[in-house]
Image (spheres, coloured by chain):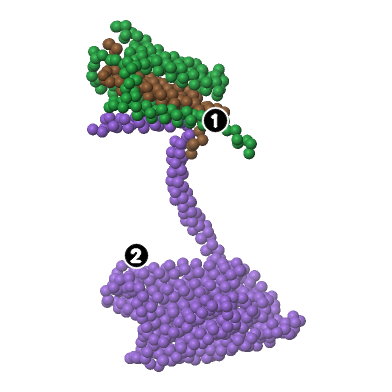
């Protein structure tokens, strides 16, 4: 709060974002890709909240955005798990390399 | 000036017959096809005779026969000066030629009615004969050198169709191709010659061309003699190239190789095309351009020497051949050699033009007796079912009409008086004697050889065996082996009469180099030499061939290698094959094919395969791997972000 | 160095470390646990920023719901003890490169842009205020997004059920 400039929080959230992206690019398992996506969403949350607190302390808009993002992330995770389970039933594997049928 | 426009009909009647037979021939009976052909040609012959009579009685102006343009139509205008016109030119030689062509063609048509009975595709046969007659008549009546070239090619096509008439025989197909290709190759020279002459004289019309080039003071003549290529003047090039085209059609050495093989066609076709009409087209061409030739000594010399060499060459080969039609083919080549060198030793005007007149006279008489020989040979082949003289013999009692006709024709060609050939040959030898003794000497020798090989043929066919021997063949009884129908005998009879009487026709009054009538007479003292030589040759042939003996074989063995190479036609065909296969095909054909396949096609294939490879690489982007897509997505966004932040100001 | 600064640095370090472990570890169950820890560190950050409500929501929804969901799906789809295959080398190199470049560029942009310093202004985020504003229809009210999100949750629920349902009738034909 005191003494931590906004930019440092932003650096932290940026680092978290890119760590999540690395996981998205690199992981072969679909569930771990989902985990990386959650990390990305969380980094965005931190951003919203930090901006709200440091730049617009009178308003609460950033908080609302965070609430909505958390809600939507939950819904999206549920649907994603459903899809992964369906895919697992068809291919008996959740390796992203195996679900490569939409190619030339 | 009487109206000659009707002369257009002379070539057009056979053309109409060709179209009718060609389009509707299959539906009609084949006999009707023959009748249609004969009728159209009868009409054309009548018209030719009428034209000849009218022309020679009315067209004399100031003692010279005029060149009359009966009809002219401008077909293609290249430039204000040069255009291709279609026209009819009447002139002593063209009038003489239309008579010869239509008459011989009529005889051949009548003969074919009997000879080709029972063959298939008769409508096509008569259609092709009509096409040929139309082309040849158009050729001789051409008023424009390019029109002549067009008809020249048409004649070549008709010849191809007729030689290859029996297209299921591979030999016939090969022969027709050979004829067409060799003459086409010669025509390349002809076309270049036409272009040289037309370019320099700025016209394609015969009359104007001759007038401009022979007037040595005119600008055109100066231009053409002034420009030169490789040290030879353009005029010589033009004339020699035109002569090359003529040499191809007239089977002069070394473009003669197609004529013996062309005997694969039906015999009436050989009579028409390869004896009397098409092969003289070259002679006609030189005669037509004779004024221009006469001012260029080099070209005339070439004409003369090529002619005399071909005459000697063909005569020696003819002494050894055993196929009756091949002997007659080489005989034709030899006689045309006579016509050529007769033109070669002549000059323009008056007494110097004797060679020209002699050449045309020999053309006239040769047409009759050579077609008689071929038709007679056809009758014999029809009877014996073989072309080889070894299978023939003793036919004089069995085929009397043919026998008399053949004998008369042989006497004519050997130059025995009073038959036709004597007069024309005598004029030729006189002309040669007065200008070039060497050519005269060779001509004399060749006339002896001519008598020898023709009587060799005559005795082998009609004597050799005694007629009683043939009784055992059982050949006399059946109707099929009879001498032939009336339609086959009638032309023989008519041509025999012509061979006897044609020599008395005063052609020197009508056809001369400058169209002024020439007075000639027979120099009996001069003709002792050729006649004596001919009689000796006949006696020699009688000794060797009249009865069966082994003297010919002993003579052939004694002559050894000379005989062998003459029998093999001096290996000219082998040389040609060698040059084309080893040198042209390997040297030019194969590299060209290699370049085409590997470099030209290779470039195309390389472009195609490069495109395919690039496409495959681009296709690989759609790999189906989501994370690759995510990377591309991120790269795109990063790029857009950089662009928006830094470049969008 | 005040205490809040130290707390911030410790929390951030833990966050980044656990996040890194979550995306690189070869065992899937451990990855989910590292994820759990990193989400807890984020909740801690929210607490440090005096946003108790958000922190609570984070723990309840994310940690208690989503991570559990993930663990269930891990159990449903594979043996959790097995090691996952290593990533493709080419792709991981490219990914590291992309990530480092992205991080560098973004931090450069952040430092370039000077943010106004508002230290000193008080920040209050009472739950009552949040709730009132969430359902209010006045100018800064969020009732419309609230309704929309509820519909979205309904759709997600139905969608998840439909997708994950087993098809029984196919074999009886």
Residue B517: image x %, image y %? 39, 90
Q: Is residue B296 left or right of residue A95?
A: left
Q: Residues within 10 Å of mark 2 (few under 14, many from 20)?
A: few
Q: Colour of chain A?
A: brown
User: What label does residue B32 carry, if any?
Assistant: none
Between label 2 and label 1, give the one nearer the viewer: 1
Can residue C149 be seen here? The reply is yes
Q: Residue at x 45, y 74 (%)?
A: B152
Chain drawn purple, letter?
Answer: B
Q: Is residue B116 left or right of residue B429?
A: right
Can residue B372 be seen here? The reply is no
Q: Residue at x 40, y 32 (%)?
A: B632
Q: Chain of mark 2?
A: B
Residue closer to the observer: B478 or B495 = B478
Image height check: is C34 above or below B343? above
- SS for dot 1: loop
Q: Colour of chain C?
A: green
Q: Which quadrant of the figure contains the C terminus of chain C?
A: top right
């Amino acid at each position: 709060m005191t003494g931590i400039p906004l930019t440092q929080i932003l650096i932290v959230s940026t680092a978290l974002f890119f760590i999540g992206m690395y996981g998205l690019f690199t992981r072969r398992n679909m569930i771990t890709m989902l985990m990386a996506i959650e990390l990305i969403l969380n980094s965005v949350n931190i951003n919203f909240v930090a901006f709200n607190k440091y730049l617009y302390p009178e308003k609460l808009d950033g908080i609302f955005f965070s609430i909505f993002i958390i809600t939507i992330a939950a819904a999206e995770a549920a649907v994603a798990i459903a899809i992964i389970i369906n895919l697992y039933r068809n291919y008996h594997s959740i390796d992203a390399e195996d679900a490569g049928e939409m190619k030339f | 000036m009487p109206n000659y426009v009707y002369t257009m009909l002379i070539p057009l009647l056979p053309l109409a017959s060709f179209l009718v037979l060609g389009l509707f021939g299959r539906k009609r009976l084949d006999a009707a096809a023959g009748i249609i052909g004969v009728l159209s040609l009868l009409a054309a012959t009548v018209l030719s005779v009428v034209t000849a009579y009218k022309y020679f009685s009315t067209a004399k102006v100031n003692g010279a026969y005029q060149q009359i343009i009966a009809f002219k139509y401008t077909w293609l205008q290249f430039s204000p000066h040069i255009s291709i016109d279609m026209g009819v030119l009447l002139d002593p030689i063209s009038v003489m030629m239309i008579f010869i062509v239509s008459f011989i063609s009529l005889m051949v048509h009548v003969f074919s009615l009997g000879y080709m009975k029972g063959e298939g595709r008769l409508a096509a046969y008569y259609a092709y004969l009509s096409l040929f007659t139309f082309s040849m008549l158009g050729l001789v009546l051409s008023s424009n050198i390019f029109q002549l070239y067009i008809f020249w090619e048409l004649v070549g096509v008709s010849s191809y169709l007729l030689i290859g008439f029996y297209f299921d025989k591979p030999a016939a197909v090969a022969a027709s191709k050979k004829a067409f290709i060799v003459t086409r190759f010669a025509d390349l020279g002809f076309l270049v010659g036409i272009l040289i002459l037309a370019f320099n004289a700025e016209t394609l019309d015969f009359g104007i061309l001759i007038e401009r080039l022979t007037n040595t003071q005119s600008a055109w003549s100066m231009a053409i003699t002034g420009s030169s290529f490789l040290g030879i003047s353009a005029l010589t090039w033009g004339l020699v190239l035109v002569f090359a085209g003529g040499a191809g059609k007239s089977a002069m050495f070394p473009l003669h190789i197609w004529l013996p093989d062309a005997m694969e066609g039906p015999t009436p076709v050989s009579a028409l095309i390869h004896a009397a009409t098409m092969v003289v087209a070259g002679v006609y061409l030189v005669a037509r351009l004779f004024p221009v030739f006469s001012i260029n000594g080099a070209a005339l010399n070439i004409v003369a020497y090529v002619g005399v060499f071909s005459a000697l060459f063909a005569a020696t080969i003819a002494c050894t051949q055993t196929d009756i039609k091949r002997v007659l083919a080489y005989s034709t080549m030899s006689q045309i050699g006579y016509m050529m060198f007769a033109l070669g030793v002549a000059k323009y005007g008056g007494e110097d033009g004797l060679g020209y007149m002699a050449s045309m006279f020999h053309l006239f008489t040769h047409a009759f007796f050579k077609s008689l020989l071929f038709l007679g040979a056809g009758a014999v082949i029809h009877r014996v079912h073989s072309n080889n003289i070894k299978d023939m013999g003793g036919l004089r009692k069995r085929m009397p009409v043919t026998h008399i006709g053949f004998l008369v024709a042989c006497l004519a060609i050997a130059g025995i008086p009073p038959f036709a050939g004597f007069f024309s040959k005598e004029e030729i030898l006189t002309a040669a004697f007065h200008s070039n003794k060497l050519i005269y000497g060779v001509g004399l020798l060749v006339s002896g050889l001519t008598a020898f090989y023709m009587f060799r043929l005559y005795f082998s066919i009609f004597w050799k065996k005694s007629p009683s021997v043939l009784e055992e063949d059982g050949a006399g009884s059946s109707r099929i082996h009879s001498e032939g129908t009336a339609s086959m005998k009638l032309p023989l009879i008519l041509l025999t009469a012509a061979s006897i009487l044609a020599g008395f026709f005063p052609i020197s009054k009508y056809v001369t180099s400058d169209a002024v009538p020439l007075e000639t007479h027979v120099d009996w003292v001069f003709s002792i030499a050729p006649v004596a030589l001919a009689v000796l040759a006949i006696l020699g042939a009688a000794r060797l061939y009249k009865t069966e003996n082994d003297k010919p074989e002993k003579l052939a063995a004694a002559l050894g290698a000379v005989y062998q190479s003459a029998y093999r036609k001096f290996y000219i065909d082998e040389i040609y094959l060698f040059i084309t296969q080893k040198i042209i095909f390997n040297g030019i054909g194969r590299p060209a094919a290699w370049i085409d396949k590997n470099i030209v096609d290779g470039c195309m294939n390389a472009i195609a395969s490069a495109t395919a490879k690039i496409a495959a690489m681009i296709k690989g982007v759609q790999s189906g791997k989501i994370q690759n897509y995510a990377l591309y997505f991120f790269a795109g966004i990063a790029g857009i972000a950089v662009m928006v932040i830094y470049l969008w100001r | 160095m005040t205490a809040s600064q130290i707390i911030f640095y410790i929390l951030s370090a833990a966050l980044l470390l656990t996040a890194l472990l979550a995306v690189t570890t070869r065992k899937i169950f451990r990855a989910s646990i590292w994820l759990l820890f990193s989400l807890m560190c984020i909740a801690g950050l929210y607490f440090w920023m005096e946003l108790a409500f958000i922190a609570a929501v984070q723990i309840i929804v994310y940690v208690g719901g989503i991570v559990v969901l993930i663990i269930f799906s891990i159990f449903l789809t594979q043996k959790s003890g097995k090691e996952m295959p290593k990533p493709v080398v080419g792709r991981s190199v490219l990914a590291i490169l992309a990530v480092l470049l992205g991080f560098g560029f973004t931090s450069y942009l952040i430092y370039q842009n000077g943010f106004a310093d508002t230290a000193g202004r008080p920040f209050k985020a009472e739950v009552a205020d949040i709730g009132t504003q969430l359902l209010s229809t006045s100018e800064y009210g969020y009732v419309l997004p609230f309704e929309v999100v509820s519909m979205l949750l309904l759709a997600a629920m139905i969608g998840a059920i439909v997708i994950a349902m087993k098809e029984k009738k196919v074999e009886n034909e």
